[in-house]
Amino acid sequence: MSSHAESQELGRGQQTLHEAVNSHRIYEPIRGVHPRIELPDEEFEEWLDGNQEIEYVVVNFTDAKEAIERDGDLSQVLEPWHIPVILGTEYDEAVNARTLQDVLDVLAIAQPAIYVPDVVYSYNWMEDEIQENALEAYTGHVRTLQELVIEENLDVRLLPTNKGWTYEHFQSTASCSRSSTTMSSRSTPFSTLEVTLVTQSTSSGATLGTPLPPSIWRMFS
């Protein structure tokens, strides 16, 4: 495939035409149902090859990282019109081992891309204090990540996942949640975000949601 091969020749300071278009497309409303693939996987890769019916390709962070380590970028997996939606929601072993630098390294190569960050677990049966600590940890992670995305001028849209369970968890996020899903690397970082963030639901009612990884809530107890 040829997805990002041209960008390696141009250098990271220049964009191909497809990358320039996708830099705008990642902020458009995501409508419909989109495939979630596993990598490396010959069957999935053959299915994506030349597939013009696919717009967004949903893939776990670990799988995207493995594909990049194998090929140097995502050019052997995605076509120029495919937008990667990279999910940080994985099993706790993978999430716990992942660093902010790991995330930035992958996003720098995968961009333009959409990323669903994840670091902690939140269940409705957890004690209130544990829920609040988990929310604070998660929003702190997303805030830091957004600041780094801006600092490094990455074409990455963050779609924070749902960590709230009560009205109070969401009442302070009505305005910032709307902006959090449309922030670009040239935007102002989070400043008033205090609790949780919006789910990855789109304006059309579709969702990119996936099951969260096994709980790591004990670290907040």
Image (cartoon, helix red, strand yellow):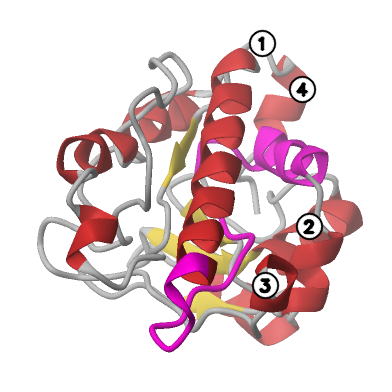
Q: Could you tell me residue 123's position as x and y percent?
A: 46, 82
Q: As shown in the figure, which amino acid type bears the numbered disc 3?
A: Ser
Q: What residue type is labelled 1?
A: Gly
Q: Which of marks 2 and 1 is nearer the N terminus?
A: 1
Which span of residues is magenta-colored? Answer: 100-129
The reply, left or right, for residue 169 in relation to residue 90 is: left
The answer to whether the residues at label 2 and label 1 have Cβ atoms under 8 Å apart is no
Q: What element carries label 1?
A: loop
Q: Residue at x 61, y 65 (%)?
A: 120
* Quadrant of res 202: bottom left
Which three-letter amino acid code belongs to the residue tagged 2?
Answer: Lys
Residue 111 located within the stretch drawn in magenta: yes
Q: Which residue is drawn at 64% across and 82% down?
A: 215
Location of mark 2 (residue): 65
| Mark 4 surroundings: few (<14), some (14-19) or many (≥20) residues within 10 A | few
* Residue 122 relative to residue 118: left or right: left
Q: Disc number at residue 9?
A: 4
Residue 75 position (above or below residue 126) = above
Q: Dot 3 lies on which element?
A: loop
Could you tell me which quadrant the C terminus lies in? bottom right
| Residue hosting label 3 | 221
Measured in 3D between alpha carbons, the distance from the residue under mark 2 to the one under mark 1, in whole angstroms, is: 22 Å
Secondary structure under tag 4 reads helix
In primary-sequence order, the first of circles 2 and 3 is 2
Q: Which residue, given by chain and number where applicable, does mark 1 sit on?
A: 13
**Looking at this view, is 54 or 140 the one in front?**
140
Numbered disc in front, either 2 or 1: 2
Q: How crowded is mark 3: few (under 14 residues within 10 Å), some or many (20 or more)?
A: few
